[in-house]
Image (cartoon, rainbow, N blue to C red):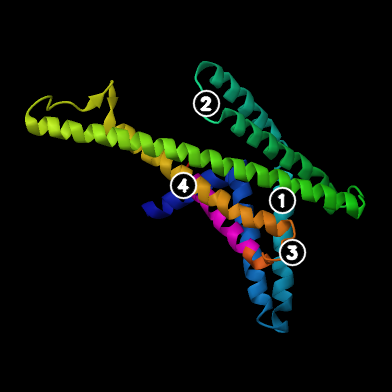
Amino acid sequence: MQPVSDLIENSLKLINTQLGRDKTCRFVQYFVKFIVPIIAARGPHMADTKDRLEKLQSNMSLTRKVLRFGKPLPLIKNIIDRLKTHEKTPVRNVLLRTISDIFLALYFLSDHPLYFQRIGFVKLDKSWVDFIDYWNNIFWLVECIIDIYCDLCDLYHIDKEIKNLSCQVQQQKLAAIAGSDSKLSTVGGIDVKLKIRELQAKKLLLILSIVRGSADVPVIFHFMGNPNITSGMGGFFGTISSSVSLYTLWGK
């Protein structure tokens, strides 16, 4: 019964957060987007199923647009906290991380008029809708590319730190074999093996973040009308990105 209990507990943790609900809806949205062309290709007898799935996909998209209201506020707080931290201790890529947060906030804000347009609350000219939609995707693309770059930089430095600490562990082993400092297990008051495990956990999260961001890039180009990326391909990459997001949130 323990696996079932853990499944229920982790599921509750996921859906009890706004981010968890958003990523769950995102997974459904893009998975449906991925399978709809496959179902449509099976023939006219699947038309009703296809229509129902497309309605589900549309509703998941609208639900996520609602969940974006208020999201710029935590980003503003992140920017303020990061700059305060940077005054005391240098933060790597502080400028790029700040620009990334600004563009993500602009993405959320520019999505609001698109939502009101879709539900019929406001009536905008098609040229205005296309204009806002284009810049909405540009904001997302810029944020995504900056995040990938910053994550790669962080990954490089973490790899470097792990190698340095691993060398220290090897030196400890050699010292133990030589009979000197055989009890040595820390460097500068830090448990080296524990620190390595912590860095490896951070490294995994960075790799997952890079995979998620990389999968989002073709999705963005699909929404920008790139003819080389079909709806099914957009759904496929979106499903990968959403799965990674859910994995990183699971059990948190």
Q: Name the image quarter holding residue 186.
A: top left
Residue occupied by mark 4: 207
Ranked by sequence position, the earlier of labels 2 and 3 is 3
Q: Kindly indicate the quadrant of the structure image that contains residue 182.
A: top left
Q: Which three-letter amino acid code belongs to the residue tagged 2? A: Val
Q: Which residue is located at x 46 percent, y 43 percent?
A: 205
Which of the two discs, 4 and 3, labels the residue nearer the N terminus?
Answer: 3
Q: Is residue 143 above or below residue 244?
A: above
Within-10-Å neighbours for mark 3: few <14, some 14–19, many 20+: few
Is residue 32 among the parts visible in the rendering?
Answer: no
Left or right: 201 with respect to 16? Answer: left
Is 244 magenta? The answer is: yes
Please report the residue visible at 67 percent of the width from the left and 72 percent of the height from the top.
37
Horizontal side of residue 204 vs 19, given as left or right: left
Q: Secondary structure at mark 1?
A: helix
Amino acid type assigned to the residue bearing label 3 in the image: Lys
Residue that badge 1 annotates: 63
Residue placed furthest toward the left: 179
Per the image, the residue denoted by label 2 is 91
